Image (cartoon, rainbow, N blue to C red):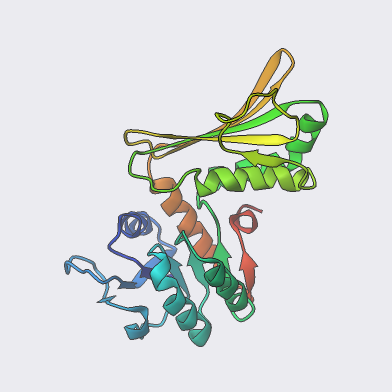
């Protein structure tokens, strides 16, 4: 059994994770942390991570960047692994994550979906072969109209996976409206679409002569991210200090 503290338990993803945990007999939420609590959770809820004294194996964090500093201190002090899902971290916070990983196991990923991380693994293996054959590379991501950032962190993670396999030879291009020229070979175009209630849709397009190969992933609900976070928590229990990603979870 993996006992979890859910950091950000009353947010949309926190509640989704609680729902997934209810269906899994190998993991249990023993405490939650959230500034707001309606009293409906079957576990104690604390207003800050510092107040939580409940023993646990790992923390799952789906809160916000402002709460991450305190979370990292708590986890390093308690030697408690953490699945870090909050986004929008500053460069200083990213340095703090790296420092924390020298003392405790930290798993951080741009996207917790097992499918997306499998796609990243495939791209690392195959992108160089296609690029060598002259295929142009484009990424199109689609999300709901409430998403604040563009392009998505996942689109950038896909681009980084490709570029890593190409020895960082490619530039990222987000807008071609101000230039009038043929497409250079050494670029990865990244386009963002915002509309409706799209949970997350990513297409990685390799466009060659007379054919197009597309790697696609579609998330139909946020449950895919919750399932990934739960899998990551079970993976992280008892792990040595270090910085892990979902690539380690899927093997």
> Up-down: is 140 above or below 108?
above
> Up-down: is 54 above or below 199?
below
Which residue appears at 34% of the width and 39% of the height?
Answer: 145
* x and y, in percent, of residue 74 in the image: 45, 82
Judging depth in this view, the residue of 73 and 106 nearest the camera is 73
* x and y, in percent, of residue 218 in the image: 47, 35
Quadrant of res 121: top right
Looking at the image, can residue 112 be seen? yes
Looking at the image, residue 199 sits to the left or right of residue 151; the answer is left
Looking at the image, can residue 238 be seen? no
Q: Quadrant of the C terminus?
A: bottom right
* x and y, in percent, of residue 146 in the image: 33, 44
How many discs appear?
A: 0
> Up-down: is 182 above or below 247?
above
Quadrant of res 246: bottom right
Which residue appears at 54% of the width and 46% of the height?
Answer: 154
* x and y, in percent, of residue 73 in the image: 48, 82
Looking at the image, residue 177 sits to the left or right of residue 208; the answer is left
Looking at the image, residue 49 sits to the left or right of residue 184; the answer is left
Judging depth in this view, the residue of 132 and 183 nearest the camera is 183
Which residue appears at 36% of the width and 39% of the height?
Answer: 144
Residue at the top extreme of this rendering? 210
């Amino acid at each position: 059994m993996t006992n979890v503290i859910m950091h950000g338990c009353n947010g949309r993803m926190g509640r989704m994770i609680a729902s997934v945990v209810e269906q899994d007999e190998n993991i249990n939420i023993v405490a939650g942390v959230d500034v707001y609590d309606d009293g409906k959770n079957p576990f104690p809820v604390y207003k800050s991570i510092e107040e939580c004294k409940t023993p646990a194996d790992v923390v799952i964090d789906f809160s916000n960047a402002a709460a991450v500093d305190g979370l990292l201190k708590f986890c390093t002090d308690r030697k408690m692994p953490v699945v870090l899902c909050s986004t929008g971290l500053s460069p200083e916070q990213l340095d703090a994550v790296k420092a924390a990983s020298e003392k405790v196991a930290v798993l951080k990923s741009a996207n917790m979906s097992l499918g997306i991380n499998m796609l990243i693994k495939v791209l690392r293996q195959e992108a160089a072969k296609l690029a060598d054959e002259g295929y142009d590379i484009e990424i199109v991501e689609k999300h709901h109209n409430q998403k604040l950032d563009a392009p998505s962190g996942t689109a950038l993670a896909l681009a980084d996976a490709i570029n890593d396999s190409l020895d960082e030879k490619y530039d990222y291009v987000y807008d071609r409206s101000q230039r009038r020229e043929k497409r250079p070979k050494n670029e990865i175009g990244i386009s963002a679409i915002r509309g409706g209630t799209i949970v997350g849709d990513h297409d990685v397009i390799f466009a060659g002569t007379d054919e197009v190969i597309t790697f696609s992933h579609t998330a139909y609900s946020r449950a895919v991210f919750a399932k990934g976070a739960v899998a990551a928590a079970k993976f992280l229990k008892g792990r040595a200090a270090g910085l892990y990603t979902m690539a380690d979870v899927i093997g």
